[in-house]
Image (cartoon, rainbow, N blue to C red):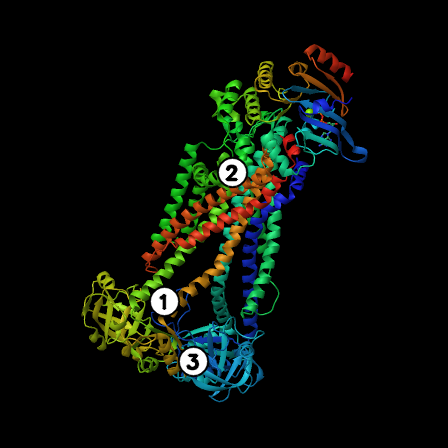
Amino acid sequence: MNLVTPATLSSTAASARGAIKIYGEGDTEVRALDGVDVAFQRGQFSAIMGPSGSGKSTLLHCLAGLDQLTGGAVFLGDRNISALSETELTKVRRDQLGFVFQAYNLIPTLTAYENIVLPTALAGREPDHPWVDRVIDVVGLANRLTHRPSELSGGQQQRVAVARALANHPEVVFADEPTGNLDTKSRGEILRFMRLAVDEFDQTIVMVTHDPVAAAVADRVVFVSDGRIIDEELAPTAENLSSRMTRIEG
Amino acid sequence: MFKLLIRGIRAHIVRFLLTGLAIILGITFLVGSFVITDTIRVSFDDLFTQLTKGTDAVVQGPLTAGSVSNPDEQEKRDPIPASILAVVRQLPGVADAEGNIQTNSEQPIALISADGKPIGGKTAPQFGYGWLRNPDFSPWRIAIGRAPTADNEIVIDAQSARDGKLNLGAQVLVNAPPDNARRYNLVGIARFGRVDRPIGATGALFTMSEIQRITRLPAQFREIYVHAKSGVSSNAIRAQIAGALRVSNANVLTGNQYRQQQQNQIRKVLKFVYIGLFVFGGIGLLVGGFIIFNTFTVILAQRTRELALLRAIGAAPVQVVLSVLGEAVVVGLLASALGVLGGIGLAISLRAVLDALDLALPAGDLVVQLRTVGFGMAVGTIVTMIAALVPALRTARIRPIAALRESAVEQPLPRRSRGLIGGFVMSAGIAAVFVGLFTKVDNSVLLAAAGAVVAFTGVFIISPLLVPPAARILGFVPSRTRGMAGRLARDNAYRNPRRSAWTAIALTLGVAIVGLVTIVTASFKQTIAAALDNQLGTTDYFIAGTLSPDITARVSHVPGVKAAMGISFVEPTIQLADNTRPNDARLVLAIDPKQLQTFVNLGAIDGDLANLANNGIAVPRSFANRHHVHVGSQLYARFPKAQLQLTIAVIFEKRVFDRPALLIDHALYNRVAALPFDIFSVAIAEPGVDTAKGTEAIKKELHDYPTAVVKDFAQFKADQEKQIDQALFLFYGLLLLAIVIALIGIVNTLALSVHERTHEIGLLRAVGTSRKQIRTTIRWESVIISVFGTLLGLAIGIVFGAIFVMSLRTQNLVTKLDFALPRLAVIAVIAGLAGVIAAVLPARRAANLNVLDAIRTE
Ligand SMILES: Nc1ncnc2c1ncn2[C@@H]1O[C@H](COP(=O)(O)OP(=O)(O)OP(=O)(O)O)[C@@H](O)[C@H]1O
Ligand SMILES: [Mg+2]
């Protein structure tokens, strides 16, 4: 299924074309991505679902310039980032992307606030203070800013991570199972913030998740299996996602 | 458990070797010192025993009255009249006997080749001997030519002859004050037993009558060697001689006793080599101990989970501790074994160096005694185990639940008790240092050294408390100039204060010692410079050497020279009217009373220097006050050639050349000294005379005194400082080694920290930190830690340097305290750069981590 059409290209925030990723050689060869074509629209909240080992994380990492493809290309907007040098990729990640991982998202020696503005500080720039204040306000961390990660709960830590991902006006935020380690309440909060970021700030988010409840918050869900995009859902609900997943896994 | 241990060590073999490196080097020095000194001793013992085995008894003169029998100084003995030789020869058990004379430091000779160069090198002492007829009594053997038979004939040792390219028939000048130089014909070249010359010294052999003339000992000997008739034991012959010489109070020894005495002399010389190497070995081990302690602490903190898992599956705390100690034993044994091998290697190379320095040792096998190997292995292993003990015991507190927790359990000592314990230990150490340095107790040096080690341990305990403030201050620079990377560096430097402090501690120790030595030597240099300026401020020329007394007169007649004064010294036994012997009146300088105040500023004086001419003596005010004497009081002095009653003619304010010296008239000295000569001569130029030209004029006047070294005074002062610096050079070289070891410790811990922070570094890279920024972070962390260690070391060095200089001051050895700040600044900069170097490898590793792999590890 080819989801990249000329009509969608202009409004595309991130996309992959013919993406192939092979780990290992010979007998141990694993095709983690086996010819993926996918595009994610600006201002949309997209989710990637699929069974364990299907290549979700690999796809996300390649889209985000954290990993190199074996074949094909990935684009950030119209820009082909597959051919960039490590130094250029680092700049792209710092200035144009945001990240949220499943856990251990924060630098333990820095306070919550310092973690939030870390990418701007790394670039040697002043943060956009009104914007950062607003983000902090929205994620509800105003009274936790001087705490260090070890003094925050897991949910609070993930909120700091989301705030950091947003603080830099990124073109895309990539999140790999951001709620995977959280209880129901914290999960709800984090998902609400991400939804808010898309609705209010016109942010683009691509999130990998196992969880139908989490994915249901997205505008669109793509399904990955054995390194291929096999399906998509444009009106996701927890119920229809669950049943689709059961079908894919079964 | 044992399998686990071996696996653990095999997995980290490089790390273990790095950890053990300091121990390896420490043991290398310890074992090296044993092997080289044993080797030297045994080969000389062999040589000497073999060469003098025909000597059954030896007669020596009685100990010179008043010669202090300090075991570290050469004994002084009176000569023996030749009549005693005649008596000995008459004895029924004596087959043969011969007398001998050897020059000594009181009767120096200078051997000069025809082209004016000293024979045997500039530094080697030169000795003259009489030629002995009977080879049983002497180690000297003619290699080429023949023995001296006429008084103008000379034989030179083989090595000096070779170095000076002297062939038979060459002319050799010998300057033996108070005579002017004489010419001798080289008729033979001799070897000293199996070697070419005695260790480090040049030897010249003369006829017996000539050496007696040179040393002004006509019809006298220093020693008589006796060969017994066959069947007469050495004890019997000794008893026979002693009986015959009852009234002469001569000292009679058996051949074995004599050889023992000579071997003891060699041992005294060796003691310095030995102590030197031993001290460096000790420092190396101390540094090594700290590095091992720190590495084990870090590694075990990182392995908390693994060890907790062991506990969870049923290992007892004791088993965990034992497994850690087991690792320490393996590291210790391995490192010690390598150190023993290294020590043997060091001894071999030291022997090569000594060869190159013309201090050739007798050939012979390297002496590696079992006790050397045992001692090296034991010390290295024990130090390693002690260093690992505290971290190992800490693992006993790890609870199984820690296996499930994320963070490593490090339970540092609470700040208060750390401060209290550390402060107490440090104070106890400093107190011991003070007692050792400032009071008279037995083994004071050992006490002071032990005190210093204890005080340093106190610093070690306290140092983690100093890290946060220090890192904040030092981190100001990178956090201002290097942005986020700099701030991360600062935060990393104090996120684990204990680790940072203890990573730096080996560097601290090295720098402290370098700083202390620098301050002490700078103070010595200042003292000398100040003494020269204060005391000889008006001087323009300085003539050094073993000078015949008439040199000064000749210099004073050189056109352009206003005045000249020769100075000499004696060390008579002084006795006060109440029969006490003051211990602060060892040195007596001979001066010219008429010239003295032209050259030397004595400060306020009581009495009249002119009165020195009538058996007068001048004493410093401090001496007068301490012993309650005044102008007109009487003293008794026993000089080599006379015993005199002297009258205190003058009491003066300032010390002469900064020594607590008494002064006598040079004319008196010439009458009472064994062999009068001047140690130096000073001269003042007429106003307006160019001292460079003046120096040339004086050199020309003294061309027939090849041993006199003429310098203008500024040059002389510069040379003095240069000499001290040169002596320091070797020392700095060896301490550099300690600092290099310390750096390896820093590399080691940084690498461990990078490993530990893999995930964090991956995260930083993911959110946009460049490789360069990662390198910057690690580099500045290393610089902060190194500079912290260096500054702490400098502080310790300054405090102990000041204490040490103060103690030297109470002994009047120095008068100035110079902190040598420019030099200390250079040390600080070097240590900072060292931090940069130490960071290179860990920083590269951190920067090259694969981002995804790093994020995946937790
Ligand atoms: N570094 C690697 N080396 C070898 N194989 C890898 C590596 N990383 C991933 N793989 C393999 O690639 C495939 C896809 O892995 P990926 O991590 O993308 O799966 P995923 O969909 O994220 O699974 P999960 O839901 O469990 O996180 C898997 O079969 C995995 O074993
Ligand atoms: Mg995954």
In space, the residues marked 1 and 2 are separated at their CA atoms by: 62 Å
Per the image, the residue denoted by label 3 is B706
Rendered image quadrant of residue A241? top right
In the rendered image, the residue lying farthest to the bottom is B150
In the rendered image, the residue lying farthest to the right is A27
Mark before the other along the chain sequence, 3 or 1: 1
User: The N terminus of chain A appears in which quarter of the rendering?
Assistant: top right
| Residue B165 % position (x, y) | 55, 80
Whether residue B277 can be seen here? yes
Q: Secondary structure at mark 2?
A: helix
The yes-or-no answer for disc 3 within 8 Å of ligand 1 is no
Q: Secondary structure at mark 1?
A: loop
Per the image, the residue denoted by label 1 is B68
Q: Is residue B10 left or right of residue B109?
A: right
Per the image, the residue denoted by label 2 is B489
Q: Decide: few, some or many residues near mark 2? Use Cα within 10 Å; few <14, some 14-19, many ≥20.
A: many
| Residue B417 % position (x, y) | 42, 33
Residue B736 or B157: which is nearer the viewer?
B736
Residue pictured at 71% horizontal, 22% vertical:
A7
Q: Is residue B84 left or right of residue B767?
A: left
Q: Secondary structure at mark 3?
A: loop
Q: Decide: few, some or many residues near mark 1? Use Cα within 10 Å; few <14, some 14-19, many ≥20.
A: few
Residue depth check, mark 1 versus mark 2: number of the one nearer the observer: 2
In space, the residues marked 3 and 1 are separated at their CA atoms by: 34 Å
Say if mark 3 contacts mark 1, CB within 8 Å.
no
In the image, what residue type sits under mark 1?
Val
